[in-house]
Image (spheres, coloured by chain):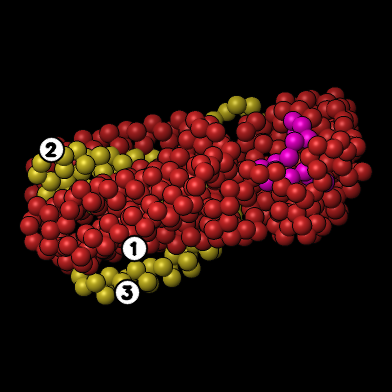
Chain colours: A red, B yellow
């Protein structure tokens, strides 16, 4: 049995917590470059070890059997999940981890309330209010993340699912939560546990109802936002427990999630509120030509595509969500390898919202051993487009739609795009002419210098690589 | 710790967070997200604390699940981030295998 040696809130414990959160900050700071990021992650993990050990040494820590059980089960699941997960599944993994974090916060809040009630004393408001906040936000985050996970894992349909009167129900739930919190806060001498559980349930419903109507394409924004929520709820738990490590770490995560959410929304030229409440992608939108009419387009096969690519000087590959779905990253890399053997310059143009979460495409391409230097951000590659011979679009759609620039009435008007129409020729590898998530037709497909290659991205890329070899 | 000391820490942490995180390039946003995910696993400390004063079966269960959730978050989060970042740092091989998992070492 370990003897408790540190006084909770005492100098030694606080000093160690300061060491822990400093390591988190240093760890994140190292994450600004791929070569130092791995070390940064280890530094942050080291901070976590310090924080956990410090807490285990606090006076008042007990029930060691339960602690060992929880740590054992959680660690085992964490290890297995992180070793097994495919890189394409990373967004749902992050959503799931985020969910359990939120769930933990909500459970801790519940436990705090029970503890407060059992003491039979008035619970000070500077403890009670953070506990209520942690419970509500943690519960929303847990359920919202689980729905996001289920959508990304295709357990439930990714298209927006809306029920009639959705907004009204959300508002009623939110008002109910606020009313419940006010009731508990005003009766802090003897708060009702039943009302607290009711609040957790209402927050759970709200988490479900807010995320269900959001389409698959908007998931990156939702995951970032829920990440921020979980972080803030952890910080609130830190206020309740007077734990400085929790406050700082939770706040860092809250800032991170907030920044990423705003960046995502900017990259889609939409507000966060619009993402959450508009149900975008559900209704067929007007702009960009009717979806029913047949418009002329050029369709080519793998061999033609191979010839176009092999005799180009510079090629830009624009990967999108479809590449992730088809798991085509390795096949595309093979095409790039074949082209480079022939002296063709190959770059990858990464739109900020390509893939299913911020930076997801970079991870997928890194997995396929694409050198970091070839992964070019949108602002960086666009000026080079006019000097590009062939732009190959693999499973991307809306992020290349010229309507965003040319058609002020388009639903995606103003969204920054990768300006592939500037390239001499465009090859679009796609299953069909069907519109992307935004539900709008892509004028790019009907441009005279665009060739459509209708196929599964992975298969098409493998065929093109083979054809280039045979040239 | 007084409430206002805590609020001071919170506000400063907001600024530090924005400052540090806005320097992370888009390329590394997925690993960043999974790393910050692991960091908010720090809520496990809360689980460790509350299980200490748990005194009925329900509280035992709540506390243990909270610890397990936190541990999934911490262990899984840091490990998966490490795996992802390993992919950014490894040397390009002449030929990538078609279905390889890669980087789990």
- Is residue A102 visible in the rendered structure shown here? no
- Which residue is found at the position 8% from the left and 61% from the top? A121
Closer to the camera in the image, B98 or A243: A243
Can you tell which mark lies on residue B57?
A: 2
Q: Nearer the viewer, mark 2 or mark 3?
A: 2
Predominant SS along the magenta part? loop
**Share a chain, discs 1 and 2?**
no
Can you tell which mark lies on residue A415?
A: none
Can you tell which mark lies on residue B8?
A: 3
Horizontal side of residue A163 vs A190, given as left or right? right
Closer to the camera in the image, A192 or A304: A192
Horizontal side of residue A386 vs A125, given as left or right? right
**Share a chain, discs 2 and 3?**
yes
Question: Which chain does the residue under circle 3 lie in?
Answer: B
Which span of residues is magenta-colored? A429-443
Whole-percent x and y of residue B73? 36, 44
- Which residue is found at the position 73% from the left and 40% from the top? A435
Whole-percent x and y of residue A95? 45, 43
The residue that label 1 is drawn on is: A248
Under circle 3, the secondary element is: helix
Dots 1 and 2: beta carbons under 8 Å? no
Question: Which chain does the residue under circle 1 lie in?
Answer: A
């Amino acid at each position: 049995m370990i003897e408790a040696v540190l006084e909770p809130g005492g100098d030694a414990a606080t000093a160690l917590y300061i060491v822990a959160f400093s390591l988190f900050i240093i760890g994140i700071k190292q994450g600004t470059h791929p070569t130092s990021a791995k070390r940064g992650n280890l530094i942050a993990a080291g901070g976590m070890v310090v924080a956990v050990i410090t807490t285990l040494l606090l006076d008042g820590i007990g029930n060691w059997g339960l602690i060992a059980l929880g740590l054992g089960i959680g660690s085992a699941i964490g290890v297995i999940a992180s070793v097994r997960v495919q890189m394409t599944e990373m967004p749902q993994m992050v959503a799931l981890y985020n969910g359990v974090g939120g769930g933990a916060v909500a459970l801790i809040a519940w436990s705090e309330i029970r503890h407060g009630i059992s003491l039979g004393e008035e619970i000070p408001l500077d403890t009670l209010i953070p506990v209520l906040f942690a419970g509500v936000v943690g519960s929303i985050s847990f359920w919202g993340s689980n729905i996001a996970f289920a959508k990304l894992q295709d357990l439930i349909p990714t298209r927006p699912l809306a029920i009639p009167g959705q907004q009204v129900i959300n508002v009623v739930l939110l008002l109910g939560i606020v009313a419940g919190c006010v009731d508990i806060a005003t009766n802090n001498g003897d708060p009702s546990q039943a009302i607290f559980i009711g609040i957790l349930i209402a927050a759970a419903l709200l988490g479900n109802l807010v995320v269900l109507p959001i389409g698959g394409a908007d998931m990156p924004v939702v995951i970032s936002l829920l990440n921020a929520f979980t972080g803030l709820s952890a910080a609130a738990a830190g206020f309740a427990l007077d734990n400085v490590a929790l406050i700082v770490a939770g706040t860092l995560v809250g800032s991170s999630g907030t920044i990423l959410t705003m960046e995502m929304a900017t990259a889609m030229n939409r507000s966060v509120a619009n993402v959450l409440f508009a149900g975008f992608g559900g209704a067929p939108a007007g702009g960009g030509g009717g979806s029913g009419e047949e418009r002329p387009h050029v369709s080519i096969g793998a061999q033609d595509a191979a010839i176009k690519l092999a005799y180009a000087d510079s090629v830009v590959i624009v990967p999108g969500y479809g590449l992730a779905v088809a798991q085509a990253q390795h096949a595309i890399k093979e095409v790039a390898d074949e082209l480079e053997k022939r002296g063709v310059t190959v770059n990858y143009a990464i739109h900020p919202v390509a893939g299913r979460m911020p930076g997801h495409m970079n991870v997928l391409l890194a997995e396929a051993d694409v050198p970091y230097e070839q992964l070019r951000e949108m602002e960086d590659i666009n000026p080079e487009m006019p000097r590009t011979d062939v732009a190959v679009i693999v499973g991307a759609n809306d992020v290349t739609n010229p309507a965003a620039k040319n058609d002020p009435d388009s639903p995606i008007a103003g969204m920054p795009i990768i300006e592939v129409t500037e390239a001499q020729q465009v090859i679009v590898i796609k299953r069909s002419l069907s519109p992307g998530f935004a539900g709008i037709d892509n004028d790019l497909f009907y441009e005279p210098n665009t060739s459509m290659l209708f196929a599964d991205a992975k298969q098409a890329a493998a065929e093109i690589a083979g054809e280039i070899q045979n040239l | 710790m007084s409430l206002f000391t805590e609020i001071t820490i919170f506000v400063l942490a907001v600024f530090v967070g924005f400052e540090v995180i806005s320097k992370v390039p888009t390329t590394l946003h997925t690993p960043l997200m999974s790393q910050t995910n692991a960091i908010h696993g720090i809520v496990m400390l809360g689980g460790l604390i509350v299980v200490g004063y748990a005194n009925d079966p329900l509280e035992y269960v709540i506390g243990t699940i909270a610890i397990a959730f936190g541990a999934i978050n911490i262990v899984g989060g840091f490990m998966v981030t490490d795996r992802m970042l390993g992919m950014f740092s490894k040397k390009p091989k002449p030929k990538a295998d078609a279905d390889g998992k890669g980087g789990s070492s």
